Amino acid sequence: MNTNGRLLGIDYGSRRVGIALSDPLGLLARPFCTLTNDAGLINRIRDITAEEEVVQVVVGMPYAPDGGMGEKAREVDRFVQDLRHLLEVPVKTWDESYSTKEARAAFQEGGMRRKKRQEKGRVDRMAASLMLQEYLDRST
């Protein structure tokens, strides 16, 4: 993918939001931070996109197993619409139905101790990174 800039990945949660960033070439994603989901969330995301020179945002969409939109997907869709109104960069969605489960499995396979694997902010960042990496890999 030739993006000429960083992509920002978002794993949206009702309490916490995992954030990942790509390298400037749009090849590799890495966990960046975890934000609290509160009234200042979108402004903090806007600040990160400006500071990190983000050219596109990718939000994980938790589709139902049948491909439909459940209540959580509708909540994420409302968040995406808010982002599109505030940000000056394109905001896309990507299926992230299993990213949190995959993040926990990656930590376990990597030998991370159970207590560290249980840190939810760490899992949220990793889930955002896995989702963004899948997007980058499939968009080339």
Image (cartoon, rainbow, N blue to C red):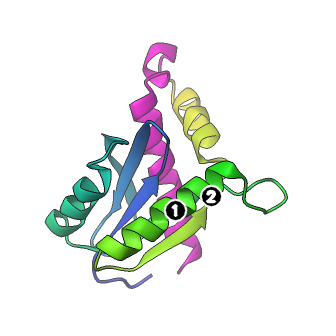
Asked whether the beta carbons under mark 1 and mark 2 sit within 8 Å of each other, the answer is yes
Element marked by disc 2: helix
Judge whether residue 79 can be spotted in this image. Answer: yes
Alpha carbon separation for disc pair 1 and 2: 6 Å
The residue positioned 39% from the left and 85% from the top of the image is 2
Q: Quadrant of residue 57?
A: bottom left
The residue where tag 2 is placed is 74
In the rendered structure, the answer to whether residue 110 lies left or right of residue 55 reads right
Can you say whether 121 is above or below 50 in the image?
above
In the rendered structure, the answer to whether residue 62 lies left or right of residue 140 reads right
Pick the residue in front: 134 or 81: 81
What's drawn in magenta, residue-wise?
112-140
The residue positioned 63% from the left and 38% from the top of the image is 101
In the rendered structure, which amino acid carries the disc numbered 1?
Arg
Q: Quadrant of residue 64?
A: bottom right
Determine if the magenta segment contains residue 136.
yes
In the rendered structure, which amino acid carries the disc numbered 2?
Arg
Q: Position of residue 136 (x, y in %)?
A: 49, 70
The residue positioned 48% from the left and 49% from the top of the image is 12
Pick the residue in front: 130 or 48: 48
Q: Position of residue 112 (x, y in %)?
A: 47, 23
Judge whether residue 133 can be spotted in this image. Answer: no
For label 2, the crowd category at 10 Å Cα-Cα, with few meaning under 14, some 14 to 19 and many 20 or more, is some
Which quarter of the rendering shows the N terminus?
Answer: bottom left
The residue where tag 1 is placed is 78
